Amino acid sequence: MNKVIIFCAPSGSGKTTIVKHLLQQNNQLMFSVSACTRNRREGEVDGKDYYFLTKENFAEKVKNNEFLEYEEVYGGNFYGTLKAEIERIWALGKVVLFDVDVVGGLNIKNYYGDNALAVFVKPPDVATLEKRLRHRSTETEETLKMRVEKAVHELEFQSKFEVVLLNDDLSIALEKAESLVNSFLNK
Ligand code: ADP
Ligand code: 5GP
């Protein structure tokens, strides 16, 4: 059975930063590109960051049972993992690396059991998470508020994860992430 690694966290915790670092550092890993219906951010590339779909297109794929999991993550926007994406990565002999929300991550972990490592990335506190989101400059006041509110709820899920990784000092968090991944892959 092939392996998968899942990084989950409230938005703003730093999981994208950690996932990008792991991808650069370990060429056994390949990022699972999710499908989503939100607008593309500046710098994001279709097929690399996400498969950006219209709501109609996304709904069509739901109807055709093409998703391993999907969710309405933020007000009206859908995100999901396409079964074909996982098959594509495994066919290349790589380990799938997921950056998904907390509920999606737990669903994927449930599905793959011991072949999955699920890591919850935790910010030092909510105020720091909000500061990081502001600094990232990708949100309006309204979407920022939505993300912070959801983060408070998502932090309650950390006890359901086998591993919680604190992202306070970034270089320490990156080092810990590397060693977690290496020991899982060498198991
Ligand atoms: P997520 O994917 O969880 O939403 P990001 O990786 O986009 O989070 O990080 C949110 C913002 O915080 C980014 O601007 C990122 O550069 C910054 N960031 C990430 N980790 C740290 C850290 N340990 N200390 C300070 N800033 C960080
Ligand atoms: P963003 O809009 O910041 O890119 O992502 C919003 C949230 O959606 C993040 O928590 C991200 O991890 C999550 N997400 C991205 N892709 C998926 C997916 O395929 N499934 C689920 N359940 N969540 C996802």
Image (spheres, rainbow, N blue to C red):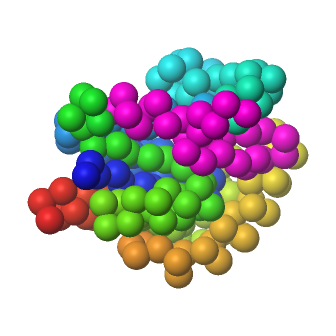
Looking at the image, which residue is at 78% across and 38% down?
Answer: 77
Q: Say which residue appears at 56% left-offset and 28% top-offset.
A: 50
Tell me which corner region of the image, top left, top right, bottom left or bottom right, holds residue 180. bottom left
Question: The C terminus lies in which quarter of the figure?
Answer: bottom left
Task: Say whether residue 83 is left or right of residue 115.
Answer: right
Observer able to see residue 38: no
Query: Which is more toward the observer, 43 or 79?
Result: 79
Residue 36 x/y as whole percent = 66, 32
Residue 163 x/y as whole percent: 39, 73
For residue 35, what is the image quadrant? top right
The residue segment tinted magenta is: 63-89
- The mark total stands at 0
Q: Is residue 187 above or below residue 32?
A: below
Q: Which residue is drawn at 56% across and 18% down?
A: 46
159, above or below 140, in the image: below
As drawn, the residue found furthest toward the bottom would be 159
Left or right side of 149 for 181: left
Question: Residue 92, how many percent across, how many down?
Answer: 24, 28
Which residue in the rendered view is the most extreme toward the left?
186
Position above or below: 22 against 149:
above
Answer with left or right where residue 32 lies relative to residue 60.
Answer: left
User: Does any portion of residue 4 appear in the rendered image?
Assistant: yes
